[in-house]
Image (cartoon, rainbow, N blue to C red):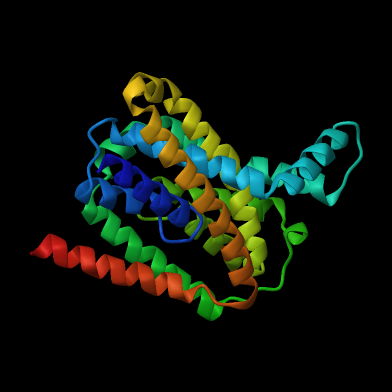
Amino acid sequence: MEYISVIIYGIVQGITEFLPISSSGHLVIMHQFLPLDFINEISFDVFLHFASLLAVIYFFKTDLFRIIIAWLKSLSGKKSDDARLANYLIVATIPAAFFGYFFADFIENKLRSLVILVVMLVLIALLFIFVEKRGKFNRESRDLSLGDAFFIGLAQVLALIPGTSRSGITIIAGMSRALKREEALRFSFLMSIPIIFGAFLTKASDIGHNFNSSSILLLILAFLSTFFTAFFTIKFFMNFAKKHSLLPFAYYRIILAFILLLYLWF
């Protein structure tokens, strides 16, 4: 049963990390209804996020290589759009890195509840609906200003609360600055890399303490199911956003919140 469970966890994480429906929220639900005994749940969640991180790095490997090279060249005075994007990604990372470092324990101990999850599912859904209905999406990533990047970075702070969705809130923030949907997705996914990596580093020692030889196969299965699901989810979502509104994801969040509310009520 545990083998099936970790594969399910991996699939859920791979889908929900990059769709704007909250991976942390879905993992909170999973731990409520499908608990794992072989590892601490926080450590396991961070491990799954690391697999997602490698998937997004692999998917955007060409972009990342170009951006890193451009940024290094900019140190010697050679400016370019890619170098400017690299600087904006750094700026956008700072707020969430700061709050994540200093408030991680509070968030993990106080905010991992179904009540908070329901509230954030609905709140972000309403923001999605508002931005989709009112926004004009005609800007490229190269049109972003430093203030735009910092604003998107501030929005990412809310993603520390389960149910928010890191991709969801940063996509909303990007679209609210008139970014095209696919450009908002691209910026959101690229800025996820340092944040997820930082979260992994802060929990790496805890993860090591929780691993043992008997759980290796379970972790390999969880990793592989997360990685491949995440990769194909990114590919699907990037293509979807070029042609479609993101409102279906807002409606899904509201439906899920309603189901959870019924569970809590009864």
Q: Is residue 261 left or right of residue 184?
A: left
Q: Nearer the viewer, residue 211 or 87?
A: 211
Q: Residue furthest left?
A: 266
Q: Is residue 231 above or below residue 104?
A: below
Q: Quadrant of the C terminus?
A: bottom left
Q: Is residue 162 in view?
A: no
Residue lying at the far bottom of the rendered structure: 133
**Quarter containing the N terminus:** top left
Left or right: 83 with respect to 257? right
- How many numbered marks does the figure carry? 0
Q: Residue at x 40, y 68 (%)?
A: 125
Where on the picture, by quarter, is residue 115?
Answer: bottom left
Residue shown at 22%/33% (left/top)? 37
Position in image of residue 46 (x %, y %): 42, 36
Residue pictured at 58% horizontal, 45% vertical: 55
Q: Residue at x 19, y 65 (%)?
A: 261
Give residue 61's quadrant in the image.
top right
Provide residue 164's location: percent of width, then percent of height: 40, 55
The percent coordinates of residue 230 (x first, y second) are 52, 52
Q: Nearer the viewer, residue 80 or 225?
A: 225
- How far across and how far down the image is residue 161, in percent? 36, 48
Left or right: 65 in relation to 33? right
Is 164 left, or right, of 111 in this rendering? Answer: right
**Closer to the camera, 10 or 199?**
10
Tell me, yes or no, if residue 14 can be seen here. Answer: yes
